Amino acid sequence: MTLISLLEHSIQHYGSKPALAHKPKGGIYQDISYTEFGESVDAFRKGLNALGVQKDDRVALLSENRPEWAITDFGSLKAGAVTVPMFSTLTAAQVGYILKDSGSKIICVSTSRQLEKVTAIRDEVPTLEQIIVFDPIEGELPEGVIQFEAVCELDGQEQGIGVRNPSHASEDDIGVGNPSHASEDDIATIIYTSGTTGDPKGVMLTHANFISNLEACKSLIDVSDADVLLSFLPLSHVFERLGGHYVPLSSGAKVAYAESTFTVAQNMREVAPTVMLSVPRLYETMHDRILRAVQEGSPLKQKIFHWGVSVGSSVSSAIQKGRKPSAILQLQQNIADKLVFAKLKAATGGRLRFFVSGGAALPQSIAEFFHAAGILILEGYGLTETSPVISMNHPAQWKFGTVGVPAPGVEVHIAEDGEILTRGPHVMKGYFNNEAATAEVIDEEGWFYTGDIGIIDADGFVKITDRKKNIIVLSNGKNVAPQPIESELVQSPFIDQIMLVGNERKNLAALIVPNFEALKAWAAENNVATGGTDGETPPLHETREVQQLIQGEIRSRLTDFSDFEQVRRFKLLEKEFSQEADEMTPTLKLKRNVIMERYGDAIEEMYPEDF
C-alpha cells in the first residue's frame, strides 16, 4: 500500500465528489472533483517524466497551500520522485541550502516572488535543472523556467522519458511511480526541520511511515466523504501534510484552502468546515478577541457571558467525569448556547465537529474555555521524525492538559531522565545524507529520542512538560521547565508573548511582549498617560503603572508554582517576536538562542550582580 494507491482508491470511489476547493482572487470557492484531481495528477506526472524526472529524483516545492501543491505532491510521487517541501516564508539563502543539501532536480514555485528567491541562488545549486511556476508570469520566461500548465500539457508516456530502462518497459510501466510498482519502503518525502538552532536536517519519510500513521489516526478519528476541512497551516509542515492532506484525501473528504492566514476567520464562515487543524495560536487569538469584545460590552452582557461560561464549564466538568449533565443543567446549557455561544459557533461556519491542535503546547485553560462553549479541541503530539503522530486525544478518549494516548502501533517509553522515547513504523528512515545525526536520535533497538520531557499518567495519557534543551538550570541546581510557566502567564490579557531566561542565574526573569491593544484600553480606563512622543512621558509599556500591572499579573498567576519557579524580573519589549525577524520558526516556536542573543543587553539589565 502506498500514498498513490490510497489516492487511486479515493478517485475510484468518490470520483464526482469534491476533493479540493480554492478561491480565486475576487471570486468564490470553486470545487475540483476527485476525478478532475486525478486527471491533473496524471497530467503532471507525465510532464515530469517528459522533463526527465526518474525514480528517487527530488522535486522541491516552495508554495503556499493551493491545488497545485496537492497536484505536484501526488504527481511527483506517481513519477517515482521524492518531494522536498519548503515553507513559503523561507529566505533565498534558506531555500538554497535545502536545494543543495537535497540535490533537488526540479523546484515548483507558486508566485513571481518565490521565483525571484530561486533565481537569486540558482547558480549555487548545480543539480537544479528546471523551475516550474504555478502563477502565470508575464513576458518571456528565463531559460530553465516553465509554467505549470505547460508541464501538464507535456506527454512523458509518448516520449518514453522517466524510465531507467525504457527498452524493457511496457506502456503501463512507463509511469515509474504507478501504484503497482511503487514500494511502501520508498522515500516519499524529505522534510527539512525548521530548527530552532543550527542548520535544518532532512527527515526521510517513507510511504509506509505515512500510511502507518494515517491508519492509526483514522482508527481513532472518523473522517469521511461528509467532512470538509479548511487548510491553512503550511502543507510543508508534516502536521498539515498528514492531517489536512493525506487523511482527508484518502477518506473522500473535501479540502478547502484558505486564501491566507489573514482570511481564516472569513474563510471559516464561507467553507463551514467540519474539522480543522491549527496550532494553539489561532485558538488563543480567538479566545482573546472574545474576551476583549465582552469587556467592551455592557455590564448586563458581561454578566450573561460569565453566566454562560459557568454553565458550560459545569457541563464540561460532568462530561469529563463520565456523567450525564442533569436535566436542569442541560436546559441552562441550551439557553447559554443561544444567548452566549451561538455567535462563536457561527463564526466557525456552524458545522464544526472538533478542532485539532498540534505543533506546540495548547494551554489547558483554552481547551476548557472552548469546551465550555461546546467546541472540542483535540490535542495531539508528534514530530517531523515520527510522521508525525505519537499520541493523540480523540472523541472517545480525551483529557485536557495532555496530548492524549499513544496512537495504535506506537510505543512510548519515558527514559530515566524524563525524555520521551518512541518506537514503531512511524519513525523516520533517518536524516538525509547524515548518518551521524541519525545515530544520535535512534538507538540500536529502534527507539527515537524525541528531546521532549514528559510523563505518562495513571490513565495512560501522555503529558509534555518541556523540551529537554529548553530546561533552565538555575545556579542553585534547580531545574525549571519554562513551558508551563509561559503557558500560564500568556493567559493574561495583557501578555501576548513571553520567553523565560535564567540559565545558571539565581532567579528567573522574562522577556515579555505585551498585548498593546489591551494595554491601550486599560490605560484609557485608568487615565494613564500614554506619552512617548514628547520626550518627557515614557512610552506606555515603560510607565510605572503598566510595570505594576504586569508585575501583578505575574504574581497572581504563579501562585501555584514553587518559589524557585517565580519570575522575579521582566523586560517589556516594544515589538513582537516574528518569523520575519527570524525569532520564530514557521510553526511559531520561539528561536530561544536567537532571541537571547538579540536581547542580550536587555537580559543583562535584568541581572545586576546582587540578583
Image (cartoon, rainbow, N blue to C red):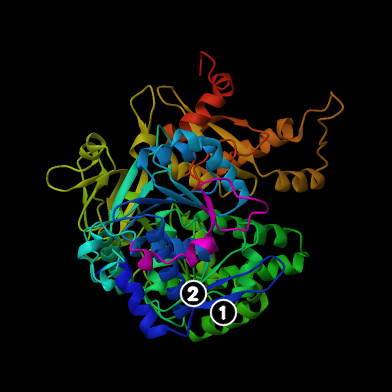
> Residue at the spot x=72%, y=68% of the render?
26
**Residue furthest out toward the top:** 609
Residue 150 covered by magenta stretch: yes
Q: Residue at x 42, y 41 (%)?
A: 99
- Range shown magenta: 132-160
Q: Please rate how many residues cluster around mark 2, counting C-alpha atoms within 10 Å: few if below 14, some from 14 to 19, many from 20.
A: many
Q: Position of residue 439 (x, y in %)?
A: 20, 38
Inspect this view and state whether residue 118 appears.
Answer: yes
Residue 459 visible in the shown view: no
Residue 130 image offset from top left, x and y in percent: 46, 48
Where residue 235 sits: x, y (%)?
A: 47, 58
Q: Do the residues under discs 1 and 2 have CB atoms within 8 angstroms?
A: yes
Q: CA distance from mark 1 to mark 2?
A: 8 Å
- Which percent across, then down, holds residue 115? 57, 46
Looking at the rendered structure, the secondary structure element under dot 2 is helix
Q: Eyeballing the image, is 209 above or below 227? A: above
Res 256 quadrant in image: bottom right
Tell me the amino acid under the disc marked 2. Answer: Val
**480 within the magenta span:** no
Judged left or right of residue 303, residue 483 is left
In depth, the one of 51 and 12 nearer the eye is: 51
Measured along the vertical axis of the image, is residue 396 above or below residue 159? below
Residue 559 vs 219, above or below: the answer is above
Residue beneath label 1, please?
333
The label number, if any, that marks residue 315 in the structure image: 2
Q: Nearer the viewer, residue 588 or 508?
A: 588
Residue drawn at x 20%, y 57% as measured from the top left: 424
In-image side of 482 versus 201 (left or right): right
